[in-house]
Image: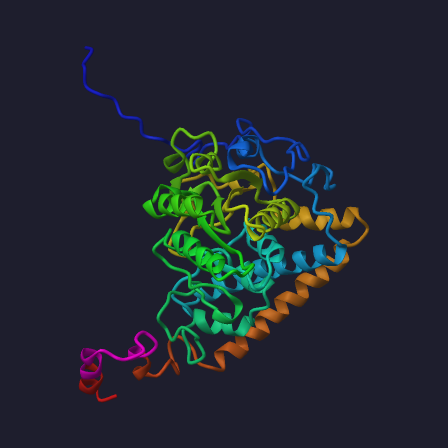
Amino acid sequence: MATNEPRYRVPVPNFRPGDEPDFSHLNIPAAGDAKRPSVDVEGRETTALALGMVRVLDHNHQAVGEWNPELDPDVLREGLRHMVLTRVYDERMQKLQRQGKMSFYMKSTGEEAVSVAGAMALKNSDMVFPSYRQQGILFARGRDIVDMMCHCISNSKDNLKGRQLPVHYTWAEGNFFSISGNLGTQFPQAVGWAMAARYKSTDQVTASWIGDGTTAEGDFHGALTLASTYKAPVILNVVNNQFAISTHQNMAIGEAPTFAMKGLGYGIASMRVDGNDFLAVYAAMQWAAERARNGHGPTYVEYFSYRADAHSTSDDPSGYRPKTEARAWPLGDPIERLKNHLIGLGEWDEERHEALDKELNELVVKSYKEAESFGTLHDGPLSPIPSIFEDVFEDQDWRLIRQRQDLGV
């Protein structure tokens, strides 16, 4: 019986647990197809980049096309090292969380190129406003591993004094803004910082990262409006890893053909990039940074990638996607792709890669033993109790003073 009741569309994932994943429906342009415009291009003229995809490494692991950044092999090896270290660190830290040595952890498996290549293409003086899964930025900028671990186990050397979840890092000395669990807040903050940098006549660029699901939040739209209006020197990065916790990207993309297309509505230069291609990520960030530094305004980048592991240690992805989906992902593993590119250049081999993996595993184990010398989550020592009243107000409110007196500290 026909009715006049409206029907509502509820987006669904392409595959459910038990399905055999098949990504043949994806329109993935060939490596080298994308054209590289001048950095002063008008935002409205980047439609082809927003609908296509910047890719450099082809199926033979060769660098092709106009976006090839032509990096020195030493730079490529450095990038490979940072990515391998990120993965080794993640694996070790997750095991420690499972052993009860920290409360929470989030791995970045499959997304290492997004953070490492992005950081390497920027200057260390540029300000970054990351989301979680960007620990590779810290490694690329030389953050001490022991200090990162001390934060994760909230011991006496935790630079955040136990006030943040593990992996919600901050590092003022490295121009790495505090990670917020309230997703999306970093986008407008990055735009504001960029506007201030421009006001002060510095060449400092800011960059921020969010996930695909966060594009459905109001902060996303506010940030793009401000960035476009004030032509802020900011790079707004969306990591489309296909899932926002347990929600497939179909819930956030709406009717847009790509997430990159969302930037065009604000007149911002926009592009989609192969997020598992180290060279493509580096080239896109390098281009966007040059554009921002020369006063041509913001860039919006979608990194097309895949979250190969759980959202966090409190998530079980087998409840919402096939167990074989990560292996079926057509854009491969960013570490393997860069490794094979270097091997193809004659600048790397499997023996050296195994040695690197062994070296970094030993480094991470040694670093954790040192981190525990400053205290453990269960046995301390932790940050001193009086520190809960510090580092917020320059002049303490009378209520805080009273509370501290009541505690006798």
Please give the count of numbered marks on the rendered protein: 0
Please state the horizontal and vertical placement of residue 256, each as a whole percent of the image: 43, 30
- Residue 118 seen in this snapshot: yes
169 in relation to 192, above or below: below
Please state the horizontal and vertical placement of residue 129, each as a whole percent of the image: 46, 58
Nearer to me, 60 or 221: 221
Q: In this view, does 264 lie to the left or right of 340?
A: left
Nearer to me, 153 or 295: 295
Nearer to me, 230 or 87: 230
Q: Is residue 405 magenta?
A: no
Q: Give the range drawn in magenta.
A: 388-402
Q: Does the magenta stretch include residue 392?
A: yes
91 in relation to 38, above or below: below
Q: In this view, does 44 lie to the left or right of 154?
A: right
- Residue 131 seen in this snapshot: no
Image quarter in which the C terminus is found: bottom left
Nearer to me, 32 or 86: 32
- Identity of the residue drawn at 43% across and 51% down: 311
393 in relation to 42, above or below: below
Toward the bottom, the furthest residue is: 408
Please state the horizontal and vertical placement of residue 249, each as a whole percent of the image: 42, 38
How is colour applied across the structure in the image?
Answer: rainbow
Q: In the figure, residue 84 lies in which quadrant?
A: bottom right
Please state the horizontal and vertical placement of residue 54, each as a whole percent of the image: 61, 38
Toward the right, the furthest residue is: 346
Q: In the figure, residue 49 lies in which quadrant?
A: top right
Image quarter in which the N terminus is found: top left
